[in-house]
Image (spheres, rainbow, N blue to C red):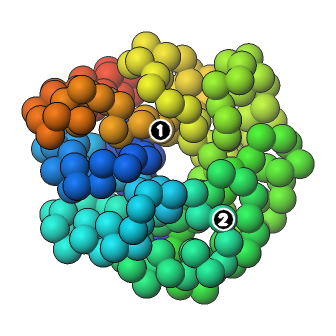
Amino acid sequence: MEKNQIVQRVIDRGVLPVFRTDLVENLIPASLALIEGGLDVVEYTMTMPGALKLIEKGRAELPAEALLGAGTVLDAETARAAILAGAQFLVSPGLATEVIEVGHRYGVPVVPGAVTPTEIMEALRFGVDLIKVFPSNVNMAYFADLIAPFPRVKFLAACGGITTDVMKEYFTAGAKVVTLAGQNMDAEGFARGRFEGITKIAKQYVQAVRDFRGT
């Protein structure tokens, strides 16, 4: 899949579940539950124990059509290792230009973090297609004001356990994608190893995106 196709898939789904947990044994079944619910783009953060092995395992065991990215990628070394482990896109909390350069070298899209107009402009100078505003939940008005001067830029709002209603507020403000904490979509079910609740909630978000976009 080409870089632009991967970015477009992320945008089309509108929701990016992000896993950051120590209960890594539940990661694959929870991801499968999300995919069953229609959210087939998932991010595993590099802060998890054995993150590279988890990415390798995810690529081997998740459906071939699913997309798996690496999050919290802070430097070039980690970026390269994540790509070699199978990560199909990289996400960083900040504007790590060395990570973007590694992504370009390997043909893998990078979603850098930015929280000021200057950072956004610098990210654009490095040729990215999607920019993560992190943190996005400081102030909704600030988020809207920040991205308003960049109407042609695609933005991801990085925040935690937002509701479908708050998600729509971000979409109204101009975001194309929002993140969700994957392990918290059904925190009790995830902790107990029962994942049907995650599928149910995923379907609710998928429908909310469709309702907002009129698709």
Residue located beneath label 2 in the image: 74
Quarter of the picture holding the N terminus:
bottom left
Counting from the top left corner in percent of width and height, residue 187 is at 29, 29
Please tell me whether residue 80 is drawn above or below residue 130 in the rendered image: below
Q: In the visual, does 64 lie left or right of 132?
A: left
- Indicate the quadrant where residue 98 lies: bottom right
Q: In the visual, does 99 lie left or right of 33?
A: right
Q: In the visual, does 65 lie left or right of 87?
A: left
User: Mark 1 Cα within 10 Å, few/some/many (few <14, many 20+)?
Assistant: many
Choose between 146 and 36: the one closer to the eye.
36
Quarter of the picture holding the C terminus:
top left
Q: Residue at x 33, y 38 (%)?
A: 183
Counting from the top left corner in percent of width and height, residue 166 is at 49, 16
Q: Which mark is residue 201?
A: none
**Quick one: which residue is furthest to the top in this view?**
165
Tally the numbered discs: 2
Please tell me whether residue 25 is drawn above or below residue 139 in the rendered image: below
Q: Residue at x 48, y 70 (%)?
A: 3
Counting from the top left corner in percent of width and height, residue 167 is at 47, 23
Q: Could you say whether the residue bearing mark 1 is in a helix, strand or loop?
A: strand
Q: Amino acid at mark 1?
A: Thr
Whether residue 122 is visible to the viewer of this picture, yes or no, is yes
Q: Which mark is residue 179?
A: 1
Q: Residue at x 56, y 24 (%)?
A: 170
Q: Could you say whether the residue bearing mark 2 is in a helix, strand or loop?
A: loop
Q: In front: mark 2 or mark 1?
A: 2
Q: Amino acid at mark 2?
A: Leu
Q: In the visual, does 102 lie left or right of 66?
A: right
Choose between 30 and 3: the one closer to the eye.
30
For the residues labelled 2 and 1, the Cα–Cα distance comes to 18 Å
- Indicate the quadrant where residue 208 lies: top left
